[in-house]
Amino acid sequence: MIVSRHRGVTWVSRITLPDRHASLLVAVAALALIAGPLGAQTQRVDSGGFRITPLIAPAYNPEMQFLIAGGVLVSWKAGPNKLRVQRSTLVSTISYSTTGAANVANNLTAFFNEDRLQLSANVSFKNMPDNYWGVGYEEGLSPEHGDSTTQYLRQWWQARVRAVWEVRPNLYLGGNVDVNHTIATDPGPRMTGDSTYQAQGSSVFNTGIGAVVQYDTRDVASNAWRGTYAALGITKYGRTLGGRSNYATYLWDYRHYIPLGRNGRTLAFQLKARLTGGTVPWPELSMVGSGADVRGYVEGRFRDRESLIGLIEYRHMFVRSAGQLSRHGFVAWVGGGALGPSLSFEGFLPNAGAGYRFELQPRANVRVDVGVGRRSNGIYFNFNEAF
């Protein structure tokens, strides 16, 4: 393995990865080279200014397996009073894996008018070998998968924009627009024999528009130490909007953050439900498992009309001897999810894991997480917290 630094970027090249555990160790080592000594302190008084931090490292996840992920974290503060607004962030990543999978993701979270206007946008693209187990808890438990059964080639892109405005202290109203397209090629026999897949076919295009009600008292949205976030979003997709199917999604997301004695030590909770109505296309069914919430399950393995997840996560940033916070930390979580064709969920999917954190910019972390689930596990490398 060769590790070098050039203009503030750590590059890792000529890497031999015998297993996923080696990939995790290399990723943590790459972060450590960027981080410097454990005692390095972070500046907690953020007076604004434009910041840009590039990063490249190896990683592993259950969908793409071993990969090289590169990205950049850009942040700034908008408005004349920099001490009264949150830091806006743009996270752009690109990755390529040993399976030939390519993934490009751009995520924007921006704050304007002293946080009264909040704008988020996501533009993503994936081209990768994937697997389709079918619909339902029991289908996802099937150990059979691979070239001759579940595998297909997935091409997917999405453009999603969400904006909310503060109408009363901590209460926001707004809307969202979602456009996405999935194309499946070379489907395996398990996929071609599935009735849900047969109903919509291999090319699924969706357009939706919705409304959002949000309550938010978090101190910092990207990495909260205290406060509550609760949001209800309803999105209607239909042929009148240009899509191929008429259906709706209902998303309830509740998060609560409790400080434990000092800054940087937090107990975080999340309870999230996604319900659907109408003729939901197979790529848009509710799922349990991804790098964003229930870490450790293959994304798309467990899917059905309704899903529910719950997580409890302990977050800890270390302290220097002088009492100042270090830029290093860790997390540990437990929880799980359930899914089913109705609110009477069919089964429970347990989840637990731990991860390393390094603060790249004020209250903006890069993370390496190891998640374990039922018959599944994964290693994730990403910017910002999972929730």
Image: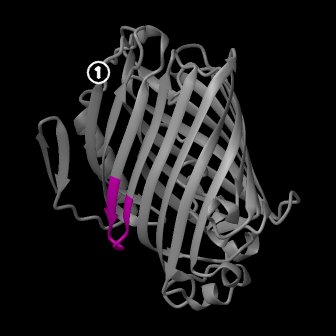
Q: Quadrant of residue 258?
A: top right
Q: Nearer the viewer, residue 135 or 332?
A: 135
> Label 1: which residue?
40
Q: Residue 261's spot in the image, x, y percent?
A: 59, 14
Q: Nearer the viewer, residue 336 or 323?
A: 336
Which residue occupies the extreme front position in the image? Answer: 240
Q: Nearer the viewer, residue 257 or 1?
A: 257
Q: Which residues are magenta?
A: 94-103
Question: Residue shown at 48%/34% (left/top)?
Answer: 109
Picture quarter with the N terminus: bottom left
Question: Residue shown at 62%/81% (left/top)?
Answer: 201
Total numbered labels placed on residues in the image: 1
Question: Residue shown at 55%/88% (left/top)?
Answer: 188
Residue 224 in view here: no
Q: Residue 216's spot in the image, x, y percent?
A: 66, 24
Q: Residue 97's spot in the image, x, y percent?
A: 34, 66
Up the image or down, 90 lies above or below 345; here it is: above
Q: Quadrant of residue 233?
A: top right
Up the image or down, 94 lies above or below 285; here it is: above
Q: Amino acid at mark 1?
A: Ala
